[in-house]
Image (cartoon, grey):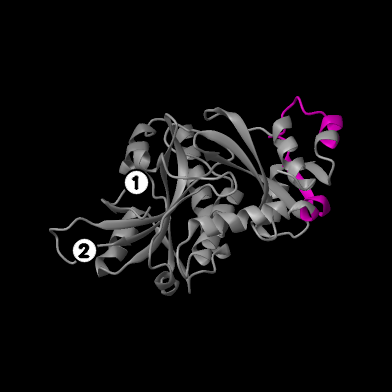
Amino acid sequence: MHLRLLGPTCAGLLLAFSSWAQEPYMPLLTSDYPRVAALRKLPLELVQEAPDPRVLKAYANNPKAMARYRTDLAAYNEQMQQAGRFWTFSPAVRVLRGQAALDSALQDQQPHLVLQAGKASVGRDAAPALWLKVLQKPATARRAQEQSVLGCFYTTQQMLFVQWHDLFFPSDMVNTVQQMQRYLEANEARPDEKKYLRALEAELTASGPVIQRKTLLIDRNLLAPSVTPEQLARKYPYPVQVVDRSVIEQAVLAADARYLYSHYVMIRGRQVYQLIDMETGRPLAYAKSGSIGVDPPVVEGWVLDGYAKFGAGRK
């Protein structure tokens, strides 16, 4: 579905996306935008977050909260910039510092390929998401700004719903960029979602040897206490290490070919873990929860069981 939407924000998109088809191995909300090849000529514009005046006002008398907010905002903007290094679809990547910078860029009335944070519906909740859009300001003031949404990616492993903002791991940003880029490349000639999904399914079927060979890194703070070392070895009989989060993030940014990691996403309100190859950013396996809801994500036994099935060559 190719949506042409009015208005500069994503606020009105929540319900529009709730019925779009998604799969555990492709959490993108996809479109049939007909001019993907033309986007090759456009730079990708990464919109960083500027301080929200409402937040600054709310935290004016709370120095500790204000410091935390500014620290988180700076971290998010740095992560967005790091993720841009993985984007090769466009001739260049530009960083825009806030909505005001984006509004200024749109004054040329030309199309712009934009990636920025927003919200998307997950059941009754609004979850953090990253949006890839084509924005263009009309030539006349009588027409509203148009935006064509190329994809929306529910993403966050931390799931820290801070009062005014959301936090991502750097790897969330990186893998979102990788999967969005791959989707555009596959649909450059002619959008064909069914063909693309079949290709991804074929890759999953053949992923066993890679899973067996590479080492899965698990964040020790996200491994469920109920999973003992013995259970971990039994449920996931392939190379695995339990490490600090910083080790995972450094390896992802280095595209370390030795490792795999777990990427948490939301699919139709259900928690899903993808097993990601750090070298390519491609999903090799997935595990899907049977329950609906947004909960703090932890790697439980069912996640390891799901990964192991793909390692053994079965879904």
Give the secondary structure at mark 1: loop
273 or 22: which is nearer to us?
22
On the image, the x and y values in percent for residue 127 come to 46, 37
Q: Which mark is residue 138?
A: 2
In this rendering, position of residue 111 left or right of residue 131: left
Crowd tier of the residue under label 1, counting other residues whose Cα lies within 10 Å: few below 14, some 14–19, many 20 or above: some
Asked if residue 225 lies in the magenta stretch, the reply is yes
In this rendering, position of residue 258 left or right of residue 34: right
On the image, the x and y values in percent for residue 92 come to 48, 72
Rendered position, 278 above or below 87: above
Q: Residue at x 56, y 64 (%)?
A: 85
Amino acid, disc 1? Cys
Q: Mark 1 or mark 2: which comes first in sequence?
A: 1
In this rendering, position of residue 311 left or right of residue 55: right
Asked if residue 142 lies in the magenta stretch, the reply is no
Give the secondary structure at mark 2: loop
On the image, the x and y values in percent for residue 314 come to 74, 45
Q: Residue at x 59, y 50 (%)?
A: 170
Rendered position, 176 above or below 37: above
The magenta-colored residue range is 209-233
Q: Which residue is mark 1?
A: 10
Q: Quadrant of residue 231?
A: top right
Amino acid, disc 2? Pro
Q: Can residue 64 be seen by looking at this rendering?
A: yes
On the image, the x and y values in percent for residue 124 come to 42, 29
Q: Residue at x 58, y 35 (%)?
A: 271
The total of numbered circles placed on residues is 2
